[in-house]
Image (tube, rainbow, N blue to C red):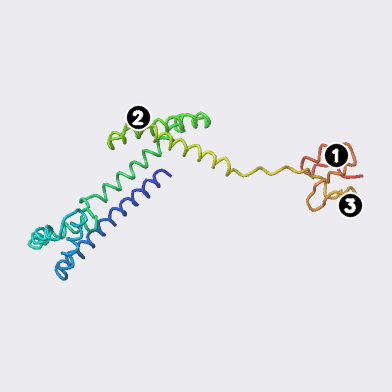
Amino acid sequence: EIAAGSIAMGLGGYLAARSDAEHYASERRREEAEIVTMPEAEAREVVEIFRSYGLTTEESATVIAALRRRPQDWVNFMMRFELGLEKPEPGRALRSALTIAGAYGVGGMIPLSAYLIFAEAHRALNVSVVVTLLALGIFGAIKGRFTGVSPLRSALQTALIGGLGIVEGRRDDHDGRPEEPEERSRVPADDEASGSGVDLEHGVLPPWRKPRRANQHACFAADFKSCPSPA
């Protein structure tokens, strides 16, 4: 299951990165065509962009004139400031796939490692919960160092969220278990003909009826074939 999940997640990351690269290439071709076919409209869009930063039309004219002399820089400007797109790095799709697949595999093996070490399922479950929470705390601290957040705060937040997920998962697993059917007493089917009031179709003794003989008490909870025949 972990191997299949890693492959699926890796393929998903690869396809997502490839889609981003294809979208960027498509938008770039469109901008290159618009700069050639409709430069005045593109120039007005540049003015609007600079106006959002507080520059006037006269102040923007100098920049527009410089961009007209450098078409590729004009395209790069429009891709970044009009569309908000950054050029994808080469090889990003493969790196993304390997990173996501590896992270999924490592993350899946952490809670399962206890079951590979301990034969008793209950003990393995307790150890798995503790190890998983510790791993979440470590990952949270590492994330905090890279994002500039307090490592302790990030570790506690990650462990808390993961702990809530574990509790919710255990509750769903418990609620999803099917209820065991209640056992019903069985009696000989031919007792219907003897007038004992037994339900012949279901082989159940109604609560207002009592067995005709004392030695039938033991057979009602077992298979009716083992019951003695009525006199």
Q: Amino acid at mark 2?
A: Leu
Task: Please give the residue where the numbered disc 1 appears in the rendered image.
Answer: 216
The residue that label 3 is drawn on is 193
Local packing at callout 1 (Cα closer than 10 Å; few below 14, some 14-19, many 20+) is: some
Q: What amino acid type should be assigned to the residue bearing mark 1?
A: Gln
Count the labels in the image. 3
Where does residue 38 sit, x and y in percent of width and height?
A: 17, 70
Whichever of labels 2 and 1 marks the residue nearer the N terminus, that label is: 2
Residues tagged 3 and 2 counted as in contact (Cβ below 8 A): no
Disc number at residue 152?
2
Q: Nearer the viewer, mark 3 or mark 2?
A: 2
Q: Considering only vertical position in the picture, is 73 above or below 216?
A: below
Q: Secondary structure at mark 2?
A: helix
Q: Which mark is residue 150?
A: none
Residue 210: percent from left, percent from top? 88, 41
Q: CA distance from mark 3 to mark 2?
A: 78 Å
